[in-house]
Amino acid sequence: MMKISKTEHARRRKNLMAMMEPNSIAIIPSAREQSRSRDTDYPFRQDSDFHYLTGFSEPDSVLVLTPGRRHGQYVMFCRERDKTRELWDGYRAGPEGAIADHGADDAFPINDINEILPGLIEGRERVYYSMGRSAGFDERIMAWVNDIRARQGTGAVPPGEFTDLNHMLHDMRLVKSAAELRIMRKAGQITAAAHVRAMQYCQPGRYEYQLQAELEHEFASNGARYPAYSSIVGGGDNACVLHYVSNEDVLRDGDLVLIDAGCEFQCYAADVTRTFPVNGRFSKEQRAIYDLVLKAQLSGIAKIKPGNHWNQSHDATVKVITEGLVKLGLLKGRVPQLIKDGAYREFYMHRAGHWLGLDVHDVGDYQVDDTWRALEPGMVMTIEPGIYISPDNRKVAKRWRGIGVRIEDNVAVTADGHEILTDGVPKSADDIEALMVA
């Protein structure tokens, strides 16, 4: 199965430790199981930072990195093997598995962390830890440090300072390796196939949730067992609600349906949006808005190449959409002034995209020293302009109201330009109509 190797996880840890100050320690807790209702939990999904550094998929675990430690720099705390609990809840790796299968230098039962981890912290000059992500673990960290401080009179040496781990680690995650790109390419292929399936299944009278079921069946059938986020299937006016997830209405003849859905494959996300006519044929007004959004998206994608900055794609989509809205009579005025005044935001109120990776809205700064970040090979982003004409917008003619269109693809920066990872689903109006009537 396609996955990140132990060697790559080890290289990531090595690179992170190389950036840490001498005589320091990094502490990264796993995600926790989340209760859904009474005696049931949501399916467990590992914390992305923890997964990035270990590939270890169990809750109740803590990763500790101690550069220069003689007895091993990679220490793991995790649940012990327990035949009774494994009978009920499934296999556990145990400390033995953390060493044998995940490359830990040393591993201990999670129940022993109060006795062992304070000793690893003591004497370290700096602790790398991301405060604020887990209130319960924040309290435990501070309790351990305060206990060391209380023993200063007997020679205990508390850490001198805390440093947020996010900046270093998230900069690493921003640039994807060849192995990560292979996985994201596969996620994009599975997601594209699911959108094609939904288009072919769609017809008036079916429900939004039935299209959602088609999408997610295709995900799971191809090894992506879960969506990367709550699937959006919005027909008619619902397409004008940016994060519509009710997916409960009937799909009506003459309406558009907007689907924003992506699978998670090996913990990496895809994020794709397509908009198409429920009956397979665009009306004149729907086609005009759709073609404008597609033109904007293609202009944004064209700006993705090394050396260009993050915001150039957004600026390109704004220019195309504003010009198009003026030509259609939905905005009035001079294009430069309309852009300066933000008049387009009545119809296009979000940015053109975001980073993509282990998280759907992935980590990484968009600006560095108040300057838009320059694109580098290995970065992956979405390009997703849209136009949403509220059904309540009385400033425009009735024939335009309730039209919502967004088109989104996942794009990787390459050495000489870009690669669209999700090009397996059609997006020209003619190609969509041909697919739906086939």
Image: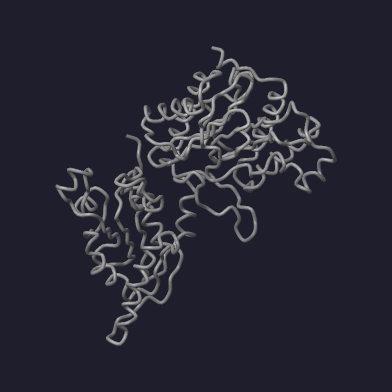
**Drawn side of residue 57 relative to residue 268, left or right:** left
Q: Name the residue located 35 percent from the left edge and 68 percent from the top edge.
A: 141
Please tell me in which quadrant of the rendered image residue 236 appears. Answer: top right
**Drawn side of residue 70 relative to residue 50, left or right:** left
Can you say which quadrant of the picture contains the N terminus?
top left
Residue furthest out toward the left: 83
Please tell me in which quadrant of the rendered image residue 110 appears. Answer: bottom left
**Drawn side of residue 78 relative to residue 370, left or right:** left
Residue 65: give x, y in percent of width and height: 33, 62
**Drawn side of residue 384 relative to residue 50, left or right:** right
Residue 251: give x, y in percent of width and height: 56, 23
Q: Name the residue located 35 percent from the left edge and 36 percent from the top edge.
A: 2
Residue furthest out toward the bottom: 153
Residue furthest out toward the right: 333
Residue 430: give x, y in percent of width and height: 63, 18
Residue 116 sits above or below residue 7 on the image: below
Residue 23 sits above or below residue 336 on the image: below
Residue furthest out toward the front: 38
Q: Nearer the viewer, residue 146 or 396?
A: 396
Residue 88: give x, y in percent of width and height: 20, 43
Can you say which quadrant of the picture contains the C terminus?
top right
Colour setting: one colour
